[in-house]
Amino acid sequence: MIIYRKATMKDVENLHQLINDFASQGLMLPRSRNALYETLREFIIAEDEGQFIGTGSLHITWDNLAEIRALAISPQYQHQGIGQKLVAELEMEAKNLYISQVFALTYQVAFFHKCDYRVVSKEEMPQKIWKECINCPKFPKCDEVAMVKNLII
Ligand SMILES: CC(C)(COP(=O)(O)OP(=O)(O)OC[C@H]1O[C@@H](n2cnc3c(N)ncnc32)[C@H](O)[C@@H]1OP(=O)(O)O)[C@@H](O)C(=O)NCCC(=O)NCCS
């Protein structure tokens, strides 16, 4: 049975490996252990019989906006609805915080469409979300797609 729970320090090595494996394929941004420690409370973990199988995080940007980040499912567990469930869990966290809009910067447009996100032009997003882009290896040539979803709170 798959459970979804908040991350703990015991998850950091698994997070580091999964995220950076995908990052080395150019699918997502890398994360240092330091960055994982500092943002650990933003992460939720999908676990199958005690085995780490995926993750995602919710980063608050503003009073009414939060970003879905670092979504990653182990290859052998993909296409089983786990990514969609993780997104739903992160949206529920946003709703519980009275945050009415979530967004992702992603290459996985078809997946986020399935989760009811719509593509918006990057210019529509507030300047503040680009604050951390300076640390991105792709800066300033960002080729990710901005996608948003309004939540009913
Ligand atoms: C993208 C990712 C998180 C999707 O997770 P997943 O658990 O495989 O997705 P799900 O099984 O929940 O899929 C939900 C729906 O999206 C679709 N979908 C998933 N990945 C897709 C893809 N790459 N292309 C097209 N559709 C996709 C599925 O077909 C499914 O549709 P269905 O309900 O009609 O069958 C996962 O493939 C992954 O970890 N990829 C590598 C890292 C990455 O790219 N992360 C995204 C960073 S923003």
Image (cartoon, rainbow, N blue to C red):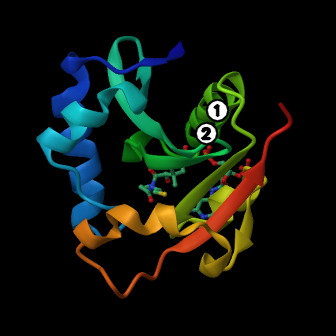
| 108 versus 58 height, above or below | below
Query: Which x, y percent locates residue 52?
Result: 33, 25
Residue 7 position by quadrant: top left
Which residue is at 24% across, 24% downward? 11
Q: Position of 40 compared to 104: left or right?
A: left
Q: Is residue 103 shown left or right of residue 1? A: right
Say what secondary structure mark 1 lies in: helix
Q: Which residue is mark 1?
A: 94
Give the residue displayed 23% in from the left and 34% down from the top.
38
As drawn, the label of residue 37 is none
Quarter assignment of residue 103: bottom right
Q: What amino acid does circle 2 point to?
A: Val
Q: Which mark lies nearer to you, 2 or 1?
A: 1
Residue pushed farthest right?
152
Q: Say which of 101 and 90 sits in front.
A: 101
Residue 84 location in percent, x, y? 64, 41
**Residue in the picture at 64% in, 32% down:** 94
Q: Is residue 121 placed above or below 2 in the rendered structure?
A: below
Q: Is mark 2 within 8 Å of ligand 1?
A: yes
Residue 81's image quarter?
A: top right
Question: Disc count in the image?
Answer: 2
- Nearest the camera: 51 or 57? 57
Q: Which residue is mark 2?
A: 87
Query: Which amino acid lies under the numbered mark 1 shown in the image of this protein?
Result: Ala
How far is mark 2 from mark 1, CA to CA? Answer: 11 Å
